[in-house]
Image (cartoon, rainbow, N blue to C red):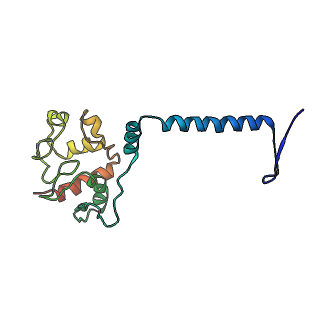
């Protein structure tokens, strides 16, 4: 004989197998709660400490971050200035400005690569023996990683000759000492 329970609140028929499963899950849950409550209190406290987060009160101020905008010198060479925006994320060109991820480029034409004071260059760049000229800069801009294997500079390069010409002219203009 198959017995079914009809619940009035849900108008649903619950079969005996469902009742057994429900009873098993409730029993298991109670058993686990009893086991946990009898556990080691120091372990429980450590677990609780790990999950606590420090919440800053609204009255506390956030630490101030100093944002220094990049100085990008004006020039009649609009294409060169626009292409330099790719470089400006990592390089400064104005004399006296600090190095960024890359060195300040002020006065670099005619100088040996990897010698600017205050910046740590890769050994690969220092050992290459490059003196910056239009030709060496063009080869560098084409693909820095293939021109100097092992360089720290993560930049894919400027592939278009027109953009290279404009950027080189812009850099010659704005990096004069």
Q: Using the image as rendered, state which of residue 107 and residue 164 is in the foreground.
A: 107
Residue, x 31% and y 67% (percent of image)? 59
The number of numbered badges drawn on the structure is 0
- Quarter of the image for the N terminus: give it: top right
Q: Position of residue 5 (x, y in %)?
A: 82, 43
In this view, the residue in front, 165 or 44, is 44
Q: Residue at x 52, y 34 (%)?
A: 35
Query: Image height check: is 73 above or below 23?
Result: below
In this rendered view, identify the residue nearer to me: 45 or 53.
45
Q: For the C terminus, which image quadrant?
A: bottom left
Determine the residue positioned at 38% across, 42% down: 45
Rendered residue at 76%/37% (across/down): 18
Q: Relative to residue 21, is residue 31 drawn left or right?
A: left
Who is closer to the viewer here, 52 or 74?
Answer: 52
Q: Is residue 56 above or below residue 153?
A: below
- The residue sitting at the right extreme is 1
Measured as percent of width and height from the top left, residue 106 is found at 14, 54
Position of residue 11 measured from the top left corner of the image (x, y, whole percent): 82, 51
Asked if residue 30 lies left or right of residue 109, the reply is: right
Tell me which corner region of the image, top left, top right, bottom left or bottom right, holds residue 96: bottom left
**Rendering quarter of residue 143:** top left
x then y, percent, for residue 114: 14, 41
């Amino acid at each position: 004989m198959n017995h079914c329970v009809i619940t009035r609140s849900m108008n649903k028929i619950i079969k005996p197998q469902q009742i057994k499963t429900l009873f098993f899950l409730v029993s298991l849950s109670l058993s686990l709660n009893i086991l946990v409550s009898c556990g080691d209190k120091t372990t429980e406290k450590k677990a609780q400490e790990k999950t606590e987060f420090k919440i800053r009160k609204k009255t506390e101020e956030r630490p101030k971050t100093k944002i220094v905008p990049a100085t990008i010198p004006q020039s009649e060479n609009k294409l060169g200035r626009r292409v330099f925006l790719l470089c400006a994320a990592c390089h400064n060109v104005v004399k006296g400005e600090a190095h960024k991820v890359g060195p300040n480029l002020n006065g670099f034409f005619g100088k040996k690569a990897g010698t600017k004071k205050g910046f740590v260059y890769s050994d690969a760049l220092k050992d290459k023996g490059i003196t910056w000229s239009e030709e060496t800069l063009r080869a560098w801009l084409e693909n820095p990683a293939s021109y100097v294997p092992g360089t720290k500079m993560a930049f894919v390069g400027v592939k278009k000759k027109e953009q290279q010409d404009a950027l080189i002219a812009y850099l010659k203009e704005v990096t004069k000492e």
